[in-house]
Amino acid sequence: MKIDEFKIFEGRNIYSHRKCIKMCIDLEGYRDIPTKNIDGFNEALLKTMPALDEHRCGIDEEHGFRKRLQEGTYLAHVCEHIIIAIQNGLGMDVSYGKSREIKGNKYYVIYEYIYSNTAVEIGKIAVNLINCFINKKSFDFNAAIRSLKEKLRLEELGPSTLSIVEEAKKRGIPIMRMGEGSMFQLGYGRNSKIIEATISNDTKCIPVDIACNKLMTKEILYNQHLPVADGYKIRNSLDLLFKAEKLGYPIVMKPTFGNQGKGVFVNIKNEKEALKAYNILSKDYDDVIIEENIIGKDYRVCVVDGKVVAAAERIPPYVVGDGVSTVNELIAILNSDSLRGEGHEKPLTKVKINNELESHIAKSGYNLNMILPKGEKLILRENANLSTGGKAIDCTDIICKENINICERAAKAIGLDVCGIDICCLDISQSIDKEGAILEVNAAPGIRMHHYPSEGKSRNVAGAIVDMLFKNTSPNIPLVSITGTNGKTTTTRLIGHVLSKAGYNVGMTTTGGIYINDKCISKGDTTGYYSARTVLTNNEINAAVLETARGGIIRKGLAYDMADVAVITNITEDHLGLDDVETMEDLAYVKALVGEAVKDEGYAVLNADDPVSMSIIDRIKSNIIIFSRDRNNHILRQNLKKGGYGVYTNGGMICIEKDDSMIPIVKISDIKITIGGRLEYNIENAMAACAALIGLNIDYSIISNGLRSFYCDEEFNPGRFNMYKVNGALVVLDYGHNIDGYKAVLNGAKNIQHNRLVGVIGVPGDRTDSSVEEVGKISGENFDYVYIKEDKDRRGRKMGEIASILEKGVLTSSIDRKKIEIVLDEVEALEKAIDNARSGDLIITFFEEYEPLVQLIKEKIDSYTNQSEQQPAAIV
């Protein structure tokens, strides 16, 4: 077995509504060989991974997977189970997986994941393990797991970030990880917030700088008459001795800009100890301070948005002697606790042995190799930070009102929206004004101790942080996703236009580019995952309108979580034979994802006149808005009976109906993109847009005005039936590129007065031969003269191949061969059509690249104007 490729889906996709990985594999001749027929395979597998014996598998019974192995299952299925089991063993709660045949020995395995880099590595290990079992080679599974743990440690989220992300999910707030670190975006667009651990983009820089400077923090708090430990900055050894004498021993020494308890020396009793500590610190830190040694317990109080939300007593790590084990062995036993892990991976952190630890236990008369007497307690560190192995006891219910007030004043004095205040006192239930002091105010405080205290209640600090971030705004913005075969771009642009009229700052992705507030920031076919993320991460917009194409859905899935409105314009034959989409049922399945990924209270907009669109209606779980040219369409009527909306045409109007109330919205003849009702497909696009806007609760008058003020031109809808008068002929540019697209444009063209109907035709090279030939046939049946051209991007075809197939199709009609010309270059083909045009001709050009053709047309307009000295021809 070998791996061909991995595809990582970070959001909802055609395989699952959970993020998952698609691993494509080659079974290399083992397609039809069950594992029971591979000597020793089943036994080796269950011996190496006994956890697999607990898998219920598809038969959903105890030891179900073992039963499947005994009956005879296949390698791709086994691979899926291995991957899930390894992830579970590493503490990741995943369960979804499936394997399917692509063709012959080619299979894919889909599996859910939490951390992508680790999950990809697990896929590789699973394949390697299977190959070793087949070839009877040894495999160091434990070493592989150790390597995975290290990879996972580098990739997994810290407890603070993870807690905030989980709280955001509970509140239905969409999240996006930014890079591979701990930075996340919560929400979309203008309403979004960026968090990294407990710092957000609302956290101010200056207060963070102040909190990082322990001396400045002390001065600000002292100025506000808050209890702090007296202290000084130390410039050299002589300065240390002078100021330590002034403070009086014992003292505390620490870096001015330290964190996580690093470099803190407490209870320094004399000059000798002070100089020793200073010599150690001054090697690593430029700025050092000393302060009075406050006697008492170590407390951490967490303040969020000016309010105390949690308090905990922090206990430094310690061991208790058994009379047999050395200190080193006792630390190893302490670290073996399943609650302890490396760094922040678990509720508690393993105690690291270093110079600071050895120095501290030496003060108690011990070293690592000495046996600790039975029952004797040995404190391992001077500080109680969780990051150095300490643990926490929740004290939120006992902190007194006076101390709550002191902590809230301190947070406001520094200016932090989230902070951790370190207090030393004998009893947090008694005011520290009398006995005790604030030692530090920490920006980006860890909240692990409050969520996972060793004793007492868990406090939901993460929830308080999320609520603070969105207390004055919703995390969500209106989000519309539009898919379908034809009409996506026009419908997308029309929705964006009306939302702009409604006062929204719209971010929009289309086949023509990414738009922010009507300005194109990136040209091209931008209908995929990354283009959508560009919009959703833009902090100017407060509405997103996303054209969501088939290719992007298949390759990467959806960039967003759930839409407010999904629109499926239609599902007709196109792209068949690409990306394993072979049938119309396959294509409908892909498009259905957009309709499925809608909020419960949201709307899916469906075209009742399109049978394939109606085939997916049972997959839709949200509200449904049906549109149709026929007000009596039975599916539309059924939806109305259920209390839903219907949008239809009646008496030359687009009308909305709900609860037996029908409201005419706009005259079809007033909708500019229908050209007086001549372009029937744009009537459908207008209905789809109208339905989507209803789903967003846009005022009907705004919808009406918006539909009437949107034009078929370069400014509003570039490349969609744009018309230009050139020397007495009418030139139309349109992006039609499939059978139904051609039919729709040609039906519209017939309703426009003309002399000859001239076609400049082409089809993308990745379409099937039969589809290309059918386009040729349609062209031959409708055009009076045909110019056949090809796209620059031939998509795997040879030069002239598509043109030849098109010509074959054209010739199946009754058109005279003399009225067919092959001009492969698109610009040259249109130029020839214009030069040979007669007055009143209508030239329809189905283009690949829009701008070169627009430039040609305008040059021709200027040329003919100069020649005839007539008024400039209008751009319609």
Image (cartoon, rainbow, N blue to C red):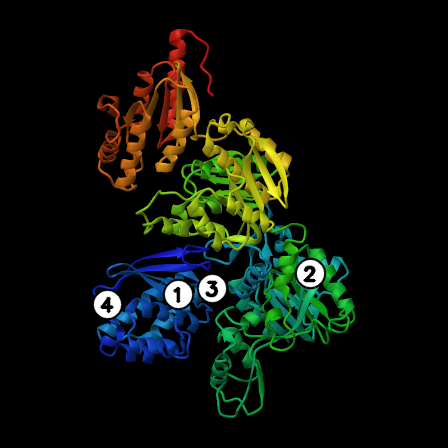
Q: Please tell me whether mark 3 sits on a helix, a strand or a loop.
A: loop
Camera-near label (4 vs 1) is 4
Where on the picture, by quarter, is residue 528? top left
Q: CA distance from mark 3 to mark 2?
A: 35 Å
> Dot 4 corresponds to which residue?
32
> Dot 2 corresponds to which residue?
218
Camera-near label (4 vs 2) is 4
Q: CA distance from mark 4 to mark 2?
A: 73 Å
**Dot label at residue 97:** 1
Where on the picture, by quarter, is residue 253? bottom right
Q: Taking 801 as reference, is 348 left or right? A: right
Q: Residues within 10 Å of mark 2 (few under 14, many from 20)?
A: many
> Dot 3 corresponds to which residue?
156
Camera-near label (2 vs 1) is 1
Q: Nearer the viewer, residue 468 or 858?
A: 858
Residue at the image point whose x is 43% and y is 71% from the top: 88
Q: CA distance from mark 1 to mark 3?
A: 21 Å
Camera-near label (1 vs 3) is 1
Identity, as a three-letter code, of the amino acid under mark 4: Asp
Q: Please tell me whether mark 2 sits on a helix, a strand or a loop.
A: helix
